[in-house]
Image: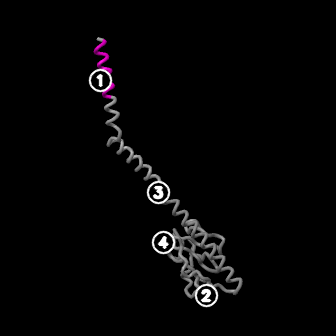
Amino acid sequence: MGLKKLSFSVMCADIRRWSTKRLIGFTLIELILALAILGILASVAIPLYAGYIEQARNEAAMADIRGISSVLTTFFADNTFYPDSLAQVGYATYLDPWGNPYQYLNIQTAKNKGHMRKDRFLVPINSDFDLYSMGKDGKSVPPLTAKDSRDDIIRANDGAYIGPASGF
């Protein structure tokens, strides 16, 4: 009986030694499980990252509009009129974070008042000039309630509000 016990323990030790040498890598199930976990983490992280990038672009557009608005106000203080285009103040080729040019309309000299930005009551949102980014979709129409204008970054109330059109 003692002999059988000894030989069984020697045999188990041989199997353990053989199995540790043989099983150094990962099994297919372990690899699939690791890939599944990475996939789940990526499916959570990518939308969060995309939302962060979009928020950063909105903030950059708002900062640009504040800066351009300040330049336009300084131009008015020096000349007693607003420029007819952004080219007169050096911003003709300046692009928003989505790669589109900023839109400007001098309300005092505008021939077509229909292009003025309007709130939900179709009342113009500015009395001096309109300055805005067309947002992510690159489309815009004068009423802020239109689908194409909801993502625009606007200047409203003569500069008192600068932010998304959907928040105005």
- Three-letter residue code for mark 4: Asp
Q: Which is nearer the N-term, disc 3 or disc 4?
A: 3
Residue receiving disc 3: 47
- Which residue has dot 4 on it? 148
Q: CA distance from mark 1 to mark 4?
A: 76 Å
**3 relative to 107, above or below:** above
Q: CA distance from mark 3 to mark 2?
A: 44 Å
Residue of label 2: 109
Is residue 30 at all visible to an observer of this figure? Answer: yes
The quadrant in which the N terminus is found is top left
Q: Residue at x 65, y 84 (%)?
A: 82
Tell me, yes or no, whether the two marked residues, 2 and 4, touch with CB atoms within 8 Å.
no
Which numbered mark, 1 or 4, is in the foreground of this view?
1
Where are the magenta residues, as a range?
A: 2-15
Amino acid at the residue labelled 1: Met
Q: Relative to the observer, which residue lies in front, 73 or 38? A: 38
Query: Which quadrant, please, contains the C terminus?
Result: bottom right
Mark 3: which amino acid? Pro
Q: Is residue 151 left or right of residue 76?
A: left
